[in-house]
């Protein structure tokens, strides 16, 4: 990859598609390799739609140390364990835990166990096998964080009730000369470049809109762009669709047509052990656990997730723990606020009400 970037004219920029044409590998593999070079400082990303990359002063050194690819065989393939093509990464015991994975925004994701694998590794294997995954659970439990950690080449569609077919496939847009040009949407871009596509809040998108996606997910791996001369788009190797679903969100409907497209469906809850490891107030974590238990029993409809606990600690660091606990009560849905206030009051041993303004100073 580094050699391909260095091989162009000084200052030359390459898209993932151009690099695929040069190297012959899948778009997903090329995109991942480019992002790895960027993280190491051995290349720079200079564009996003499409992604463009340029060599840096250190790219040549990386190319010099790169191993030239050769024909597959024993000399290039490490021996496999007796019962599988590759070893199963250890999870759980101290010293065997995988390290955190850096997301595109620079934040770190701490892998969790999924089918005796780190969740990031499990999702990557499912992508290699072409098995679509639906992650479901309350907002703030880390579904998007996991997907971003697993797939550096990710393109995200934030779904809602206003999402249109044009938002997925593309539409005509007026250019600077007063004419119109067709701009491909995220679905077409992901298909052409062999990238992963996340449908965030997929169940908020109209079923009629989602129907435009289904031909790309089945054996055809093609869609027809009727708005653009009936053009047929065929998915490049590496193209993959993954979705997120928040069952408790108003308007979220998991239709049979959508559910049937995702062979693997994984429930995602908050990792309260991670909240403790991140040194979030232990009483706040205990309150969240208690409310989560009440939620499972149907006694309350809301419980703080990891997102709310991280915010709690930031508020406590700025305004103090008392204000943070009051805010925890205040952010609860109105129908659950009294119950949340009771749980917080019991844990602290003193009355706690929603954060509010006091008298004039």
Image: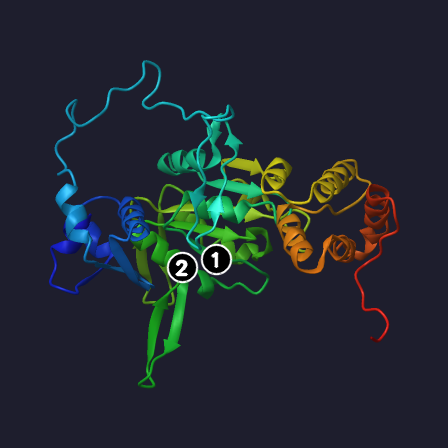
- Image location of residue 174, percent across then percent down: 37, 80
Number of numbered discs on residues: 2
- Identify the residue at image location x=38%, y=48%: 152
- Image location of residue 285, percent across then percent down: 70, 41
Residues under numbered marks 1 and 2 in contact, where contact means CB atoms less than 8 Å apart: yes
- Identify the residue at image location x=65%, y=55%: 317
- Image location of residue 318, percent across then percent down: 66, 59
Relative to the observer, which residue lies in front, 81 or 36? 36
Q: What whole-number distance in Å separates the C-alpha atoms at marks 1 and 2?
A: 7 Å
Q: With 104 as the anchor, is 297 left or right in this view?
A: right
Q: With 238 as the anchor, is 163 left or right in this view?
A: right
Relative to the observer, which residue lies in front, 341 or 189? 341
Q: In this view, does 73 lie above or below 145?
A: above
Q: Is residue 96 above or below residue 136?
A: above
N-terminal of the two: label 1 or label 2?
1
Which dot marks residue 186? 2
Label 1 sits on residue = 157
Quarter-of-image position of residue 98:
top left
């Amino acid at each position: 990859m580094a050699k391909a970037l260095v091989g162009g004219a000084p200052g030359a920029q390459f898209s993932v598609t151009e690099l695929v044409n040069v190297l012959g590998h899948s778009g997903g593999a090329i995109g991942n390799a480019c992002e790895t070079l960027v993280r190491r400082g051995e290349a720079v990303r200079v564009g996003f739609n499409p992604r463009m990359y340029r060599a840096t002063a250190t790219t040549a050194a990386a190319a010099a140390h790169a191993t030239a690819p050769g024909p597959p065989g024993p000399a290039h393939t490490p021996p496999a364990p007796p019962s599988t093509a590759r070893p199963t990464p250890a999870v759980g015991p101290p010293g065997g835990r995988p390290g955190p994975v850096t997301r595109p925004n620079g934040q770190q994701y701490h892998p969790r166990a999924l089918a005796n694998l780190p969740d990031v590794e499990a999702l990557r294997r499912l992508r290699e096998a072409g098995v679509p995954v639906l992650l479901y659970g309350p907002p703030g439990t880390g579904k998007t964080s996991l997907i971003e950690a697993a797939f550096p080449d990710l393109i995200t569609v934030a779904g809602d009730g206003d999402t249109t077919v044009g938002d997925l496939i593309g539409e005509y847009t007026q250019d600077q000369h007063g004419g119109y040009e067709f701009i491909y949407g995220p679905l077409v871009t992901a298909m052409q470049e062999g990238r992963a596509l996340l449908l965030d809040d997929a169940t908020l998108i109209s079923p009629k809109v989602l129907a435009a996606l289904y031909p790309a997910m089945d054996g055809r791996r093609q869609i027809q762009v009727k708005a653009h001369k009936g053009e047929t788009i065929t998915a490049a190797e590496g193209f993959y669709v993954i979705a997120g679903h928040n069952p408790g969100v108003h308007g979220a409907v998991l239709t049979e047509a959508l559910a049937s497209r995702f062979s693997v469906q994984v429930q995602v809850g908050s990792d309260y052990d991670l909240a403790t490891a991140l040194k979030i107030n232990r009483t706040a974590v205990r309150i969240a656990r208690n409310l989560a238990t009440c939620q499972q029993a149907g006694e309350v409809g809301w419980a703080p997730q990891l997102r709310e606990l991280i915010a709690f600690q930031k508020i406590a660091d700025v305004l103090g723990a008392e204000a943070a606990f009051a805010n925890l009560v205040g952010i609860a849905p109105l129908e659950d606020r009294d119950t949340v206030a009771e749980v917080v009051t019991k844990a602290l041993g003193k009355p706690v009400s929603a954060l509010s303004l006091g008298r004039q100073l």
